[in-house]
Amino acid sequence: MNARFGANPCACGGLRGPLLGRRGLMVGAALLACGPARAQTAGPANPALVADLVVASHILFNQGVVDAFGHISARHDRAPDRFLMSRSMAPGLVTAADIMEFDLDGAAIDPRGRAIFLERFIHAEIYRARPDVTSVVHSHSPSVIPFGITGVELRPVYHMSGFLGGGVPVFEIRDAGGPATNMLVSNAALGHALAATLGPHRVALMRGHGSVAVGANIRQATFRAVYTELNARMQAEALRLGPPTYLNDAEAAAANDTDDVLMGRAWELWVRQAAG
Ligand code: MN
């Protein structure tokens, strides 16, 4: 992993390089003090970003996308090679104090003894592979599971899920991890393989496990995770009645553009619900 950032593990050599390369001196300045080999924090994230991450965790629970398991992350607003996610806990209970900073190797910057998610490599490797992505949701939302195990392709059945247009790939963990994994994406190699399967898409399914949804911001990733679950539920229902007519690629693309404009309405409602 270090090879991607240069061989020097020191915070001065190993981390300043890529940060300066992509963000300029402003970000690098926080790391100029050379000392311990441990990676240093990129500094506090925007409190509004942390607040959105917390409320998105609650929304995903309220909407039935996550239960006690699953997680959402956001790329750090001051350091593109860092991301934020909660310590290992149920998303519905997350507070701002639970949000931790990670690097793209999945290492916690200031762990302080806190338990961290085994599957943080899902997030790390997608951020590494996809500069356009600043938020990732991983869930086991139930209606999606059948599409990962049957070969029946998840496709957009209505205008709220145009983001599914262009295809929804399925990650087969046996291809990267062999026939006897515990199904979890618990190391960088598996995360890298999952990110490769995702490719340029917005959603990928994980056979026998769940799915990932990505977005250019927390709201978009949350919206896509919610409507992936709803689309799966409706598509399965439709398949019981007869062969569905799916949105074609042009309809899906146009609907996706419209949803990007309108999703603030859903966010406003969901935030209000989450506030009780
Ligand atoms: Mn999982």
Image: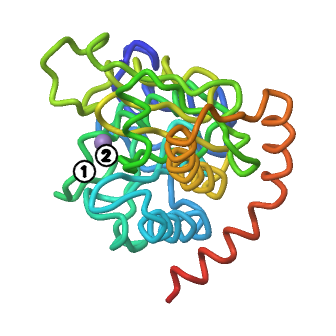
Left/right placement of residue 74 relative to residue 144 reads right
As drawn, the residue found furthest toward the left would be: 180
Q: Residue at x 25, y 53 (%)?
A: 111
Q: Is mark 2 within 8 Å of ligand 1?
A: no
The residue depicted at 38 percent of the width and 36 percent of the height is: 146
* Callout 2 touching callout 1 (CB < 8 Å): yes
Callout 2, which amino acid? Ala
Q: Quadrant of ligand 1?
A: top left
Q: Is residue 172 above or below residue 139?
A: above
User: Which of 252/218 is in front?
Assistant: 252
Identify the mark at residue 143; answer none if there is no mark.
Answer: none
The mark total stands at: 2
Q: Which residue is mark 1?
A: 116
Image-based side of 90 in relation to 55, left or right: left
The nearer-to-camera label among 2 and 1 is 1
Residue type pointed to by label 1: Ile
Q: Quadrant of residue 179?
A: top left
Q: Which residue is mark 2?
A: 108
> Considering the numbered disc 2 on the image, is that residue within a helix, a strand or a loop?
loop
The CA span between labels 2 and 1 is 8 Å
At label 2, counting other C-alpha atoms closer than 10 Å, the crowd grade (few under 14, some 14-19, many 20 or more) is: many
Quarter in which the N terminus is drawn: top left
> Looking at this rendering, what residue extends furthest in the front direction?
241
Measuring from the top left, give residue 135's x and y in whole percent: 56, 47
- At 48% from the left and 47% from the top, the residue drawn is 137
Q: Earlier in the sequence, mark 2 or mark 1?
A: 2
